[in-house]
Image: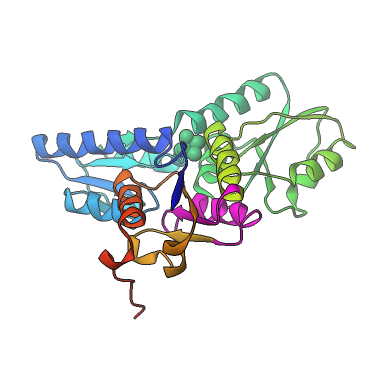
């Protein structure tokens, strides 16, 4: 079997950085005898969350559950303004792992606003990155993905710019561009994460050259699911796997398999899948559904 392993595989730079900051904070918490909390899942990957828990980290989903004096790790997507204020007020040390590429979007938005431009953001309503950016810069107008009418239609402007949530491929942007261009001068500034773009490009090539495709990642991970859906447009024999037991039997008989991953798949998960492909299924009984 030929294994076509992607070069762009495993954690992206933002997730790698977040994981390193979190690991350092867990060590600091142990030395200082302080509790370390994670506000939400640092990474959408159950194995990584189990690892965090077994290292002493506590995962909570509301900032109000975090006691004074503790350390809190904030996610790479960014954190809303009011939550940051809460931590400051309650003397909770925050370790903000916001990805520099996500943060760059704040700078782009602010620099256009300061020059008098109206700023529009193409993004998924409710996505933490979008919620956080708009909480810090409320002048930004959301253009929802998928396309739909809404408050954005009331925006008045002479000069406007459309930027993007870093992980969104918005075919819809052209629709928005066309409608908004009837109101004023408007342009697109591509702020999509280059790592997501190159991962997708390579994945599509490998998927189209291989008989089967394995996309490694968690079912909960939105970027992994998006990658899988995109890959399925060129190869219908694509599967989401997070452990060797998830690999369908037929894949072990394949002439070639592309091995890809979302940006939240840890190295140990990728290694396990590659070893299973090399050594065959017999070593790894299939998962039983309960
Ligand atoms: S996908 Fe890109 S923007 Fe998102 S965390 Fe990774 S490097 Fe940062």
Q: Residue at x 32, y 57 (%)?
A: 276
Q: Position of residue 183 (x, y in %)?
A: 87, 36
Of the pair 254 and 248, the residue shown nearer to us: 254
The C terminus is located in which quarter?
bottom left
Q: Quadrant of residue 11?
A: top left
Q: Let me know if residue 193 is in the magenta part.
A: no
How are the residues colored?
rainbow
Q: Residue at x 79, y 43 (%)?
A: 176
Magenta segment: 209-237
Q: Is residue 242 left or right of residue 21?
A: right
Q: Position of residue 101 (x, y in %)?
A: 50, 30
Q: Position of residue 138 (x, y in %)?
A: 60, 37
Q: Is residue 86 left or right of residue 175?
A: left
Q: Is residue 85 above or below residue 268?
A: above
Q: Position of residue 55 (x, y in %)?
A: 17, 48
Q: Let me know if residue 215 is in the magenta part.
A: yes
Q: Residue at x 75, y 47 (%)?
A: 172
């Amino acid at each position: 079997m030929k294994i076509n392993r992607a070069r762009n595989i495993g954690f992206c730079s933002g997730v790698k950085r977040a994981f390193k900051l979190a690991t350092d904070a867990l060590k600091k918490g142990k030395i200082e005898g302080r509790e370390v909390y994670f506000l939400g899942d640092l990474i959408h990957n159950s194995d990584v969350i189990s690892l965090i828990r077994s290292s002493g980290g506590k995962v909570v989903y509301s900032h109000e559950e975090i006691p004074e004096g503790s350390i809190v790790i904030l996610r790479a997507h960014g954190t809303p303004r009011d939550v940051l204020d809460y931590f400051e007020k309650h003397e909770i040390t925050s370790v903000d792992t916001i990805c520099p590429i996500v943060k760059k979007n704040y700078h782009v938005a602010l620099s256009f606003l300061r020059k008098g431009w109206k700023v529009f953001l193409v993004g998924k309503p409710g996505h933490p990155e979008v919620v956080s950016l708009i909480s810090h810069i409320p002048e930004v107008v959301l253009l929802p993905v998928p396309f739909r009418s809404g408050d954005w239609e009331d925006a008045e402007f002479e000069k406007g710019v459309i930027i993007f949530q870093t992980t969104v491929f918005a075919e819809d942007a052209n629709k928005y561009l066309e409608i908004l261009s009837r109101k004023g001068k408007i342009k697109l500034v591509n702020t999509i994460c280059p790592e997501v773009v190159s991962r997708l490009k390579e994945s599509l090539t490998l998927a189209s050259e291989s008989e089967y495709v394995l996309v490694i990642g968690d079912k909960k991970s939105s970027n992994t699911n998006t990658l899988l859906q995109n890959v399925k447009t060129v190869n219908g024999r694509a599967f989401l796997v997070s452990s060797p037991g998830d690999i369908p039997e037929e894949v072990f008989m394949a002439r070639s398999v592309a091995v890809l991953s979302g940006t939240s798949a840890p190295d140990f998960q990728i290694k396990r899948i590659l070893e299973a492909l090399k050594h065959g299924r017999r070593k790894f009984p299939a998962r039983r559904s309960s």
